[in-house]
Amino acid sequence: MKFKGLAMALLAGIIFAGCTNGAEETKVEKEIETIEEGLGGIKDYGQVTVISEAKPFVLEENESLSYELSGVKIIKLENYTEQAEFPLTLKHGVLDINEVPESLYMVIGTEKMKNKTDSPIVFGGAYKMKEGSNMNVSINTEDILFGDDFGAVIVGGADHKSQFAVVIDNPEVTTLSFTLPSAWDEKNNEDDILEEQEFTMEFIKK
């Protein structure tokens, strides 16, 4: 009987250990998935190292439009994939990915916006990024993440999510300013939904 009891205890221990390992593996998988979601589409372009990160910006007290800029990070991209070859060679005006620098620094971010009215609103999200007087980048023209066909009109009641990745020279910046354009009702051409405004994000080293 003692032997039987010992065998049962050992079996229970093995089963528990197996369950524990399975739970730990699931936890790790979920953590990896969360990290990859935070990187957005840039994770498909190569190996990503996060250098610094900023807290989300949320547009306050607007009855017609909601807007959030989150997941804003300065990253290092290297070991490019085939998916990255076209946007990176186009960006650098070359034909061969080997002519692109071995690593690039970028600012990435995810924009979430929603039209809370019944009428279409003209609004395209942040369109300019700058660091003091040293950098003034057009997000619309410099974004290297392809596949987002969003225009500037959000139909009534709709929400939209988009991502951007913009190459920068200095990865050590601690603050960046972003500019939101004005927004207006497309039908009535009223521009009092949102005035153009600038906001600043502070980056914390990882």
Image (cartoon, rainbow, N blue to C red):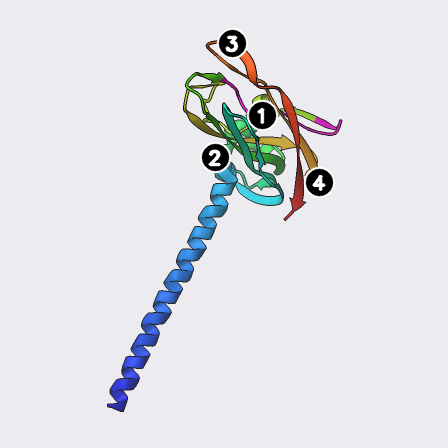
Q: Amino acid at mark 3?
A: Asn
Q: Residue 70's x, y, as percent?
A: 55, 37
Q: Nearer the viewer, mark 4 or mark 2?
A: 4
Q: CA distance from mark 4 to mark 1?
A: 22 Å
As displayed, is residue 105 above or below residue 19? Answer: above
- Using the image as rendered, state which of residue 164 and residue 69 is in the foreground: 69
Mark 2 / mark 1, whichever is N-terminal: 2
Instruction: Inspect this view and state whether residue 50 appears.
Output: yes
Residue carrying label 3:
189
Quadrant hosting residue 138? top right
Q: CA distance from mark 4 to mark 3?
A: 42 Å
Q: Residue furthest top?
A: 188
Do the CB atoms of the residues marked 2 and 1 lie less than 8 Å apart? no
Magenta stretch: give its range. 122-135
Residue 126, label in figure? 1
Do the CB atoms of the residues marked 3 and 2 lie less than 8 Å apart? no
Q: Nearer the viewer, mark 2 or mark 1?
A: 1
Q: Amino acid at mark 1?
A: Ala
Under circle 4, the secondary element is loop
Residue carrying label 4:
172
Instruction: Inspect this view and state whether residue 94 appears.
Output: no
- Other-residue count near label 3 (Cα within 10 Å), few / some / many at <14 / 14–19 / ≥20: few
Under circle 2, the secondary element is helix
Residue 82, label in figure? 2
* Left-right relation of 145 to 107: left
